Amino acid sequence: MKEKALQVLLVEDNAGDVRLLREMFSKEKADSFELTHFLRMSEAVIHLAKGGVDLILLDMGLPDGHGLDTVRRAHAAAPGVPLIVLTGLDDELLAAEAMKEGAQDYLIKGQIENRALPRALRHAIERHRMQTKADLILTHQMQFKDEFLSHVSHELRSPLTAIYQFVTILLDKLAGELNTEQHEYLQIVLTNVKQLQSMIDDLLEVTRVQTGKLVIDLQCTSVYDAIVYAVNTLQGAATAKGINLSSDLEFRLPLVTADPTRLRQILIILIDNAIKFTPANGVVKVESRVFDEDSNLIILEVSDSGCGISPDMTERIFERLFQASDPDLAGRKGLGLGLFICKELVTRQGGQIWAKSAPGEGAVLSLTLPIFSLSNLIAPLLKDEAWPSDSVALMSVEISSPYGWPSKERREEWSRESRTLVQTCLLPDLDILLPKMDSEGTREVFFIVAFANDKGAAILAKRIREQFGHLEHLKHEGLNVSVTYKFLSPTPGDVVAPSKDTAGKMAARIDELIALESLERVVTS
Amino acid sequence: MSKKKILIIEDDPHVRLGYHVRLKANNYDTFFAADALTSMTEALKHQPDLIILDLGLPAGDGFVVMERLKANTYVATIPIIVVSGRDPSANRQRALRAGAKAFLQKPVDNDELLAAIRQCLDETNGLRQPELIPQA
């Protein structure tokens, strides 16, 4: 069978090199390669867009492109086409970088042997084909695994529901009286149902982590509330095991930027683990304070008087599927996913988590979270730490439901959706959407700090109103959206000179305005 | 006050019975439908005060049922609580947008379910307190 000629695209501006390469190709069998040549990247990109190219030979120093940039452009124009870079003798390092960017190989000009060229081309094509195939198989496998896990965990829920329903029906004596022994045994069933349920939840959560579907909604969050909630939730489990679970919190803990639901989830996993690994009459304690090594962070610690972790294991416990090997605890194993999930959740919220322990002396699991700071949020937008020459607006987007929200869930849903919508209207280097502060009364309020003058602010406000105007179900549910703004008025002292404290001063003004705003809202409602 | 009527739309017979026993013990009357087709006729026939709806159903899923219910004047205002084993991250928003009052994941805690039911019924009874107006 006659093979189709390989279409090779040569992008090279040096006439001598072109001649040399043409010479080499001419020695090949007449119909095995077909060479197309361009001098410039811009022409090559147009040609690539038409398709049909089997391989790109790319010089890294073109009149309209240089170095790795040319590789990226070629890749962007034809992502599926293998690429070999041509480089000078002194540029081997650069060529190696190009391979990291996805080039299959590099050839050093002046050192290309006649027979080596076609071989290199065929190798590159073959290697690329195999790589593509392997990637595809891997993607399929991952997809299948995720779908499988997701499917299985959902299918398990129905039978589990029936078990839960009837165990609780018996326990609540809806089907007649129970003797002590029966009651005790049913409690055991219930405990295991709950454990099974949390395993299924963990499975799903891990699938979400790995498919990037884990949603984290960063807000201005109270660590104090989260700890109180988690401790209350697990107090029963601790008491049942004769463990003293307590918390020791600084009176005025600063707020953090975190997802409140996720924070509670993290704490519950950590405290639950601590209880699990602590024998009867032990102690589990939750503490939190400003981190003494970095005052931008808050530290949370869950300590226990349990069996401890051997030093070589303190990092491994955060690995997926890690399980304690202690035989005493074998009966109470989970899936070994809890701490893995914790680590993912903490990292995604900008914190760190680690463990310290000596065997037999209990363990301390610590995590950090960024303290909520307006000035840190604003700082990246400031040029040279100077108060911007244009004015700065504080815009508030307020969604209200005059007839009351259909449900708490629906309201949260709206809040999330609105944030996403507002976010799409913003310019990344000029506007910031502040994390959710308090949602109060009948309204959801979002604040935006916009580096904009009168006109800019008006345009942004209009854009946001229009975006909300497109939402059908907004009208359907009778919600009102209002967008208003005020300008930050710096006191004369603020503007004088650039200083490290500009962001701080600006944050203080914003704080004042927000406070004023909520005061006005209370008065007018 | 007469007993409140709850229509349970759920295809698993054991789960259905489980709801029935629990709800009866809490002084509710229960009716059942096991698929999307009978859901509509049962809703029209019994005019329940509330519907508990599963999402995975034969002959059209829970979303289809919700769409039909919401399109019929005689049953459109009946509050719906979705209780499903499906992934909330993919289905909660969709369910709430389709008109459900709440989305609960299976297995749902008894107290949580009963609280959601009470809340829905209170709201439709007009017993819900108006938002507090601060005194000037």
Image (cartoon, rainbow, N blue to C red):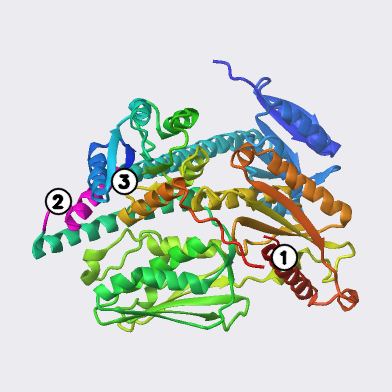
Q: Overall secondary structure of the magenta stretch?
A: helix
Q: Which residue is mark 1?
A: A520
Q: Depth check: give the residue in front, A495 or B123.
A: B123
Q: Which is more N-terminal, label 1 or label 2?
A: 2
Amino acid under disc 3:
Arg
| Whole-percent x, y for residue B110 in the image | 30, 53
The answer for which chain carries disc 3 is A
| Whole-percent x, y for residue A202 in the image | 38, 55
Q: Which residue is mark 2?
A: A175
Amino acid under disc 1:
Glu
Residue A129 showing in the rendered view: yes
Please give left or right for residue B117 compared with residue A9 in the image.
left
Q: Which is more N-terminal, label 2 or label 3?
A: 3
Front position among marks 2 and 1: 1
Front position among marks 3 and 1: 1
How many other residues sit within 10 Å of disc 3, few (<14), some (14-19) or many (≥20)?
many
Quarter occupied by residue A79: top right
| Whole-percent x, y for residue A186 in the image | 16, 58
Instruction: Tell me, yes or no, whether dots 2 and 1 are on the same chain.
Output: yes
Say which residue appears at 48% left-offset and 61% top-offset.
A261
The answer for which chain carries disc 2 is A
The magenta-colored residue range is A156-177
